[in-house]
Image (cartoon, grey):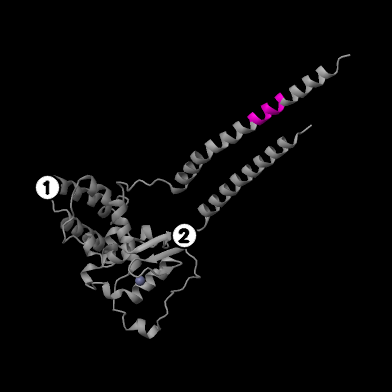
Amino acid sequence: METLRQIRTKNSYFLLLSLLWITLLSSSISATSPLSQSNQGTEQHATSPAQDKSQVHEVHCSRERSRAAWKVVEEYLMPFVEKEKYELPRQCRLHPSNDLFRDQEEHKIHLDVNEWRCGYCRKSFRAEKFLDQHFDNRHSNLLDADHSKCLADVCGALHCDLVMEIKSKKTKCNPAAAARNRHLCEGLADKCFPANQSPSSTRLHELFLRQFCDAHTCSGGGKPFSRGGKKHTNRFYLAASVLTLMLLPLFYLIVYLYQREIKRGTQELKRIAKVGRKAKPS
Ligand SMILES: [Zn+2]
């Protein structure tokens, strides 16, 4: 026999459990939604294209390749530079001030998977590429279009293709191109980490050669980024463990409450039975 209260508490457990499932499901959905941006977004400003055109400056530097080069520097060089507490000289082409797009890239606000905001004028976009277009159309006047500041130009030395995820078909190694990239690479090492300037500079010079330059050869030399890069904590595992930590106490609370209710229910039954037995005799 179920008393009314037992039914009520059971119902509330079901409600709690289903709520739990809903939170779990919705969080997993948001975690698995694709990171690649949808193409539905359009630039949301009301000015005419003619107005935009007047502001377009001629910039002959690939934003994508500059971004790739920056990514390589951040992942595979800066951890070591920071460890040595070394400061890149201004004449080093990898210095942040020598990246044409650095300021714009730092004015990107990534709010959500499908929401990017312009840090200059606060306009929102559904994908990073639309924000890139917006920068080109509306804020290119902020670019100091100095050719020497194109980070994409050192992509050959930095193996940008490896981080750009454009799996190029296995092309035959071109000895002339490899030699050119090696030369560019060694030039970067000399400019950014002048040997014999300081112990840390010498160490970083060596590291730069091993990390980036050794692989520029057709004779099967070392692999690029052989010294490793920045350690990543997997975002999915982080989210999962935070969620588990949050939900575990809730789960135990529910179990505890449920058991308490059952205990109370059986005690009540016992009392009823006792009363029934007392009322029975003779
Ligand atoms: Zn803007």
Q: From which residue to which does the magenta span run?
A: 259-267
Q: Could you tell me the amino acid type at mark 1? A: Ser
Circle 1: element type = loop
Q: Under tag 2, what secondary structure? A: loop
In this rendering, would 189 be left or right of 282? left
Q: Is residue 176 left or right of residue 276?
A: left
The amino acid beneath tag 2 is Val
Which residue is found at the position 32% from the left and 50% from the top? 223
Check the image and report above or below for 135 versus 2.
below
- For disc 1, the marked residue is 198
Question: Mark 1 near mark 2, Cβ–Cβ under 8 Å?
Answer: no
List the single residue furthest toward the bottom.
50
Report how far apart the C-alphas of labels 1 and 2 lie in the structure: 44 Å
Name the foreground residue: 113 vs 230.
113
- Residue at 30% of width from left, 54% of height from top? 74
Q: Is residue 207 above or below residue 62?
A: above
Residue on which the image places disc 2: 113
Whether the magenta-drawn stretch holds residue 263 is answered as: yes
Q: Could you say which quadrant of the image residue 11 lies in?
A: top right
